[in-house]
Image (tube, helix red, strand yellow):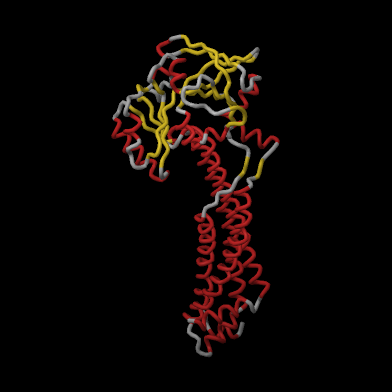
């Protein structure tokens, strides 16, 4: 077997130009496929991080009626042991209660509709890293009477730390809700949609403002393993019963999921076209190589070389060329993908504005995962392996007399 490998290696370098052209075509296919796929997957991960890990959590629990009517009237009565019971699930690491509703925020002559969120500051910080988003002032603590305002909203309201914000809304069971709150801190969300409208306060203060004691609108959950998310949803739904609606982030953020799926389909089509071009290039090279060496094959068979062994040598030649191209493409793409993973491309201009209009951060990071490196190189190797059948078939059907006269 060692002899055949040595012979195949020598054969591919007998025509260096042909070998280098074929290797280069495979190299660029793998290189650009990995780069394109890493940017796609990185963008999807960034979208999910902007919304899921920054706010919603992987799973949320609502009242069963909340899905059709997302109002404070369909809130959950938070029992004394409810959170601890939920956290008993082996895949749940944290349960975060929130009370969410809308209000009209006013500061000076500026007024805007906002989302008011009452939360447990310590738990929220564990789930979303909320304290790391503070750009001015201080983070909330339990019992605080102040509020946190998102940066873009604070800019619109022309307010800063120490200023007051008036909130007007409708509380639980139609009770009027109006109060004055001091801005304790300004925080910045990576999602422009959230950054435009968020006011966060301590949960008991929010419940008092909306006249909704012990009421919450949702419970957000953090998980040990995201891949077990669907099973965790099923387990919690069975545990809590039909009066609650347990939903994964994919069921909550359907628009985001559809956007990712649509873009992913487009990316796969582009990869397919790229692989088609590479496939035709490799197949053309194989045809040319087989035609040029027809007389050589005839001589080798005439002196006693078995056709099956000759076909095996040709297969080894193509596999070696494919391996060289795929390996070099994967290796040389590694530093670029890693650099973009550490320092993502920051978009600007109209492109950035378009992305921000969808509530996403205008950056293009890459995903640092081993799976797509191997998958892209593997697809190219499959294409090369399929192309090998042509020279093998040509050798097995070879007629020595015609080949010697070629």
The residue lying toward the viewer, choosing from 266 and 340, is: 340
Give the residue at x 63% y 52%. 339
Q: Is residue 68 above or below residue 106?
A: below
Q: Position of residue 221 (x, y in %)?
A: 41, 35
Quarter of the image for residue 295 reads: bottom right
Q: Is residue 132 above or below residue 376?
A: above
Quarter of the image for residue 354 reads: top right
Q: Position of residue 171 (x, y in %)?
A: 45, 13
Q: Position of residue 1 (x, y in %)?
A: 48, 81
Quarter that holds the C terminus: bottom right
Give the residue at x 53% y 85%. 400
Position of residue 316 in the picture relative to residue 71 (left or right): right
Q: Position of residue 356 (x, y in %)?
A: 62, 33
Total number of numbered discs in the rendering: 0
The residue lying toward the viewer, choosing from 339 and 44, is: 339
Q: Residue furthest bottom?
A: 303
Q: Is residue 283 above or below residue 169?
A: below
Give the residue at x 52% y 74%. 315
């Amino acid at each position: 077997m060692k002899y055949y490998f040595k012979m195949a290696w020598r054969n591919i370098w007998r025509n260096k130009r042909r070998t280098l052209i074929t290797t280069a075509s495979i190299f660029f296919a793998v290189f650009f496929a990995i780069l394109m796929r890493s940017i796609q997957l990185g963008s999807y991960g960034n979208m999910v991080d902007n919304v899921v890990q920054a706010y919603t959590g992987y799973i949320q629990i609502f009242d069963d009626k909340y899905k059709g009517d997302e109002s404070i009237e369909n809130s959950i009565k938070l029992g004394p042991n409810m959170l601890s019971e939920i956290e008993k699930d082996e895949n749940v690491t944290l349960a975060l209660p929130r009370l969410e509703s809308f209000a009209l925020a006013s500061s000076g002559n500026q007024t805007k509709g906002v989302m008011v969120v009452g939360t447990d500051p310590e738990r929220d910080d564990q789930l979303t890293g909320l304290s790391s988003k503070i750009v001015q002032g201080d983070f909330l603590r339990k019992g605080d009477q102040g509020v946190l305002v998102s940066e873009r909203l604070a800019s619109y309201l022309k307010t800063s730390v120490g200023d007051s914000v008036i909130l007007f809304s409708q509380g639980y069971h139609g009770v009027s809700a109006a109060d004055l709150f001091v801005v304790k801190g300004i925080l910045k969300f990576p999602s422009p949609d959230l950054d435009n409208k968020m006011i966060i306060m301590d949960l008991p203060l929010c419940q008092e403002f909306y006249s909704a004691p012990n009421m919450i609108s949702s419970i957000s959950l953090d998980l040990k393993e995201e891949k077990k998310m669907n099973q965790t949803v099923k387990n919690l739904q069975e545990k809590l019963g039909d009066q609650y609606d347990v939903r994964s982030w994919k069921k909550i953020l359907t628009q985001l999921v559809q956007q990712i799926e649509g873009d992913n389909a487009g990316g796969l089509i582009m990869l397919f076209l790229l692989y088609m071009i590479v496939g035709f290039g490799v197949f053309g090279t194989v045809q040319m190589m087989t035609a040029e060496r027809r007389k050589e094959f005839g001589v080798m068979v005439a002196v006693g070389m078995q056709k099956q062994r000759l076909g095996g040598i040709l297969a080894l030649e193509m596999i070696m060329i494919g391996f060289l191209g795929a390996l070099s493409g994967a290796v040389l793409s590694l530093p670029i993908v890693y650099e973009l993973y550490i320092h993502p491309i920051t978009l600007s201009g109209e492109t950035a504005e378009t992305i921000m209009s969808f509530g996403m951060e205008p950056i293009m990071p890459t995903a640092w995962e081993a799976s797509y490196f191997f998958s892209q190189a593997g697809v190219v190797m499959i294409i090369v392996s399929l192309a090998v059948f042509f020279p093998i078939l040509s050798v097995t059907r070879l007629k020595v007399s015609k080949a010697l006269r070629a």
